[in-house]
Image (cartoon, rainbow, N blue to C red):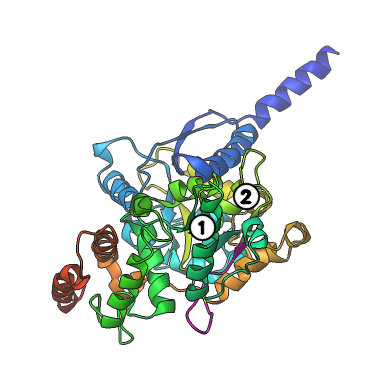
Amino acid sequence: MTRLIQTCLALLVLAAPARAVEISLSCGVIGAQYNVCQDSVDRWERRTGHTVRIVPTPQQTNDQLTFFRERLARPESGEVIDVVKIDTIWVNFVEQYLLDLRPYSDGAETQHFSALVENASFEGELKAMPLWSGVGLFFYRKDLLEKHGATVPRTWDEMEAVARQIQAAERAEGNRIWGYIFDGAAGEGLTCNAMEWLATMGGAQILDGEGRVAVDDPAAMDTLRRVKGWIGDIAPPEVTTLNNESAREMFQNGGAVFMRNWPYVWALAQEDWSKVKGKVGVTTLPGGEAGSGAGTSGGWYLGVSQDSAHPEIAADLVMHMTSKNEQLQRALFSSVNPTRPELYSNPDIRNMSDFFGEIFAALQTAINRPNAELRGSYTFVSDRWSAAVNAYLAGEADDPLTLFAPLQEQLARLERRGW
């Protein structure tokens, strides 16, 4: 018995890490993304014996980029963050501060969508690993559509009509509800919304068809005038202050018939505590007269800081969180889109619901933001463009050209300098 105990103790010592360390990770602050990351981290901690401390970061996407660039470029300005979660459009801004992951990946990158891997590859080095992908989606209250004899809108015209119809009918019954909400606060979320409106209702999406800056495009101004007409009519005045999470909360509390948001909302809407459990449908965004919608593509990566004191352990955390099993868990329990093609044919995922079928449909017409064309100036341009869109929608100008004509001049000067 003594020898057996000694043998078991020896095996435990061999199985445990030589020295347990703490790894810092940025992976959301509140809400669904934080919970998804924490679940994955918990499994890694149990397997390795190491611990992870999730570092608070700004909630707005653009503020997060500023935060990471400052921390990665000047680690002396604060604590080093070992592992950072990076938006798909950020990789080229921070890649010089990130470790090459190929020595730690054992070829795992070949199992992800090749385009995602290429987006994070620089001169043969892999600076980040795909974590999850995303695309803008259209969520709707299927119970309310059925109650009022309406069908899922396929065009913006239909969306406006159905939103007004159900909003009026529900309010007549004493229910305070709005027709349509979206993340209208200034920031990257609004950039995505505006790109989608312009792609389907008409107008240059920052750049025209020849790749020239055209933020004052007449057709784009007409589209923004139309969207502004929604506010106070089918969209609440405070929509210009909503981000994706506050919009989700409003929708999930029964405050809207329709909502534009990201795929993660689907799983949360099905939770037992959700006021709309079993009442939500999802499909591609409405389109123009032809009915072809277009959601903005998105997604996130994980990278390791070059200044990490524990690069091998940090890289192991990245490989764990982006692994096949972890992506399967996120797809099944959090409706997070995998970045591994094989998982889309997984029978458990296919049999779960029609959700991933809608994801595939949305991906077929997805549009990209012009981060490749604008290179290092993308965030500057996006920040100012979304701020102008937000200011116009919030009523700071009667004519959009009041805001977009001077912005056109500013960005044209930047364009002449080669971005």
Classify residue 166 by image quadrant. bottom right
Q: Secondary structure at mark 1?
A: helix
Is the residue 291 above or below the residue 360 in the image? below
The main secondary structure of the magenta stretch is loop
Residue, x 50% and y 70% (percent of image)?
A: 161
Q: Which residues are magenta?
A: 282-292
Give left or right: position of 384 versus 149. Answer: left
Q: Which mark is residue 167?
A: 1
Classify residue 106 by image quadrant. bottom right
Image coordinates for residue 65, horizontal then vertical, percent: 32, 52
Residue, x 47% and y 31% (percent of image)?
A: 22
- For the N terminus, give its image quadrant: top right
Report, in whole angstroms, how far the alpha carbon at label 1 lies from the one at label 2.
25 Å
Is the residue 389 above or below the residue 211 in the image? above
Residue, x 58% and y 60% (percent of image)?
A: 140
For label 2, the residue is 267
